[in-house]
Amino acid sequence: MLDDIKIAYDPTVDINDLYADSDTTHTLTAFYLTRGRIPNRLIEISAQNTNFRDAVLHYMLEQSDRADLELALKGLTKAISSLEDGDVRLLTYSEYAAVLATVLDEKTIAAKVIKRNNLSTASSLLKTIAMAISKSMPGKTFNELMKNNTRSAVSTWVDIERPILYPIG
C-alpha cells in the first residue's frame, strides 16, 4: 500500500485538494491527517509550538489504526514531494511523516524523509528518529517511546498553551 510513496521533489504534484479547514485543536488536526488531508493551520501552529505537534502525534498514535496512519503518511509525503529543497514547510511535514513511517516500520521511507531536510538544521525530533532507525528499533518499540515522550504535551497544549495562544472569543 505504501509502495507508491514519493519523497523527492516533483513539480507536478499539487496538494491543493488535500487541504482541509481546521482549528487549533490537536484532535481535529489528527482526525484530518488520518484521513489523508492536510489541515490548513498545521504548519503555522506546529512551527510555533512543539507541544501542539507532540499532542497531535500522541493522539494519532493512541487513537489510530495502521490504515489511518498509512493515510496520514501518504498525505504528508505527497505534501513533502510538492516542496522544493529548502522550503520552510518541509521540516514540519517531515517531522510528522518520519514519526509515522518509523512507527509503521517503514524505515526506508522515514530515512528518505529525513534526508530531504538540511541535516545541519534538522530538529531534535528528526535526529531522534534517525537514531532509532540507525539502531534498528522496531516500530512497536518506537511507537511506545513516542507515546511516552509526547503524553505530557497533550495537557500542556490543551490546558495551558492553546487557551493563551488561541483564546476563544
Image (tube, grey):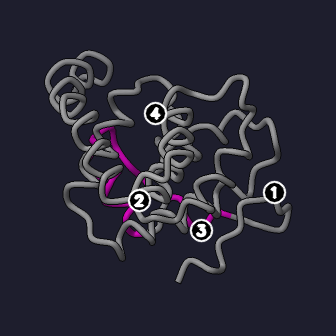
- Contact between marks 4 and 1 (CB within 8 A): the answer is no
CA neighbours of label 2 inside 10 A, class few (<14), some (14 to 19), many (20+): many
Amino acid tagged 2: Leu
The residue pinned by badge 2 equals: 33
Is label 2 in a helix, a strand or a loop?
helix
Query: Is 15 situated above or below 41?
Result: below
**Camera-side residue: 19 or 34?**
34
Residue extent of the magenta highlight: 15-35
Q: Which residue is mark 3?
A: 17
Q: Residue at x 56, y 32 (%)?
A: 127
| Mark 2 or mark 4: whose residue is earlier in sequence | 2
Left or right of 104 in this view: 89: right
In three-dimensional space, the C-alpha distance between marks 1 and 2, rounded to whole angstroms, equals: 21 Å
Answer with mark 1 or mark 2, whichever residue precedes in sequence: 1
Q: Residue 167, position in %: x, y?
A: 24, 22
**Residue depicted at 32% across the width and 44% down the height:** 56
- Locate the C terminus by quadrant: top left
Residue 84: mark: none
- Nearer the observer, disc 3 or disc 4? 4
Q: Is the residue under label 2 in contact with that under label 1 (CB below 8 Å)?
A: no
- Going by the numbered disc 3, the residue's amino acid type is Asp
The residue shown at (52%, 53%) is 97
Residue 110 in view (yes/no): yes
* Residue type marked 4: Ser
SS assignment at label 1: loop
Q: Is residue 24 magenta?
A: yes
x 31%, y 42%: residue:
146
The residues bearing labels 1 and 3 have C-alpha atoms spaced at a distance of 18 Å
Query: For mark 4, what is the residue?
Result: 46
Q: Nearer the viewer, residue 145 or 169?
A: 145
| Residue 3 lies within the magenta run | no
